Image (tube, helix red, strand yellow):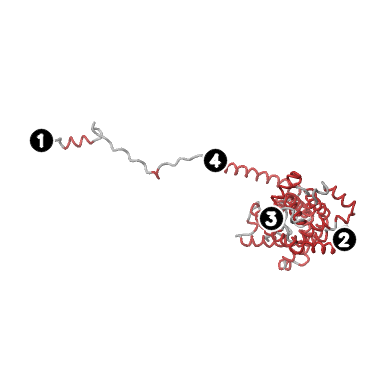
Amino acid sequence: MVGLFPSQAAVRGSLLPTSPFYKPEPAPAPHPQKRPIFSAWSAADTVKDKAQQLGSEAQAEYEKASSKAQAKAGKIELYSGKYYAACVVGGILACGTTHTAVTPLDLVKCRRQVNSDLYKSNVQAWGKIYRGEGLRGVFTGWGPTFVGYSVQGAGKYGFYEYFKHKYATLVGEENAAKYKTALFLGASASAELIADIGLCPFEAVKVRMQTSIPPAFSGTMQGISYITAREGTAGLYKGLYPLWGRQIPYTMMKFASFENIVMAIYSYLPGQKEDYGKGAQTAVAFTGGYLAGILCAIVSHPADVMVSKLNADRQPGESFGGAMSRIYSKIGFGGLWNGLPVRIVMIGTLTGLQWMIYDSFKIFMGLPTTGGGGGQTEKQTAGATKA
């Protein structure tokens, strides 16, 4: 019986790796969570990297152009002649371009103010105008809009900066800080009073072009010649009083509310205004401007309706008061609010973009942005804005 069973040594030897009968255990499969992660190509990452590259290149070009402009302009001291000239250019860029861009909205708004039954909606109005007059018809009045609001922007922003500093100097630093809102209101009203004198002739041409179907004339100079030939120079200024009635409250609200909203935003954010870069400061300017624009639209809308009505329907030789009474008797109080939703969208966007463009230009020239306080003083010069 002993020969039927292998010895212990034989069994042990058969289990060793050197034995021909040895069969190793298969290696265990790796745990799924411990397997190596292979990187995969991502289209989103490629687009993101390309966008970052283009953004860096654009920023470099912007800095290069800004440096050249500042070098060419030379040192710009705050509240100097060069400073106000820069503000004038910024105002032209801010107002002329933005008002021209929203000409289609303005066209429909003016026509609906004159005749509320003309169109049912903005989209329906644009479609009808486009089918009848083409793309040019949708932008009816862009010429006098661009010229007029460029002139107005130059006066509004340039004189605002001048009067704000002038009135602050007159009342003293302590009173200027204590009654800052009154200071903003007074400076903006003074600036708009002057700016509207330049705007009024072009506003008269614009309104007549937009509210007559087909347009009474095709160009700015043709419109000025047409009006002066029949009504004299006074015909270009017959809407001045209602224009003041619309624009002065509008601008007072625009500047005072913007300044206070921007101050509130920076007081809510951590740190000081100077701690934020160019992009953040222009974003604050757009936000403050948009919110201010909504308030502006509501405050000035009745006068805006009356300006459109007077320019389109005031009879030759009719007095200002008589024309207003006649028009009001026809449209009533409710008629003064025709087109308000459209105007809120238009003016909110318009005002936000204006402040963003204006402050962006000031940054481009190395000047501090508007509002928000900060440690800027009259002795500081261009280049003080944080990169």
Q: Which SS class for mark 3? A: helix
Structural crowding at the residue carrying mark 4, measured as other residues with C-alpha within 10 Å and reported as few (<14), some (14–19) or many (≥20) = few
- Quarter of the image with the N terminus is top left
Q: Which residue is mark 4?
A: 43
Q: Which residue is mark 3?
A: 345
Q: Which SS class for mark 4? A: helix
> Viewer-nearest of labels 2 and 4?
2
Front residue (pair 287, 334)? 334
Front residue (pair 4, 338)? 338
Q: Position of residue 58 (x, y in %)?
A: 65, 44
> Viewer-nearest of labels 1 and 4?
4
Q: Is residue 239 above or below residue 55?
A: below
| Mark pair 2, 3: CA separation | 34 Å
Give me the disc on residue 2: 1
Who comes first in sequence, dot 2 or dot 1?
Answer: 1
Q: Amino acid at mark 1?
A: Val
Who comes first in sequence, dot 1 or dot 4?
Answer: 1
Name the residue: 72% across, 68% down: 179
Who comes first in sequence, dot 2 or dot 3?
Answer: 2
Q: Is residue 145 above or below residue 191?
A: above
Name the residue: 28% across, 36% down: 24
Q: Which SS class for mark 2? A: loop
Q: Amino acid at mark 3?
A: Val
Quarter of the view holding residue 251: bottom right
Q: Horizontal placement of 283 versus 216: left or right?
A: left
Q: Horizontal placement of 174 versus 201: left or right?
A: left
Q: Which residue is mark 2?
A: 318
| Mark pair 2, 1: CA separation | 141 Å
Q: Amino acid at mark 4?
A: Ala
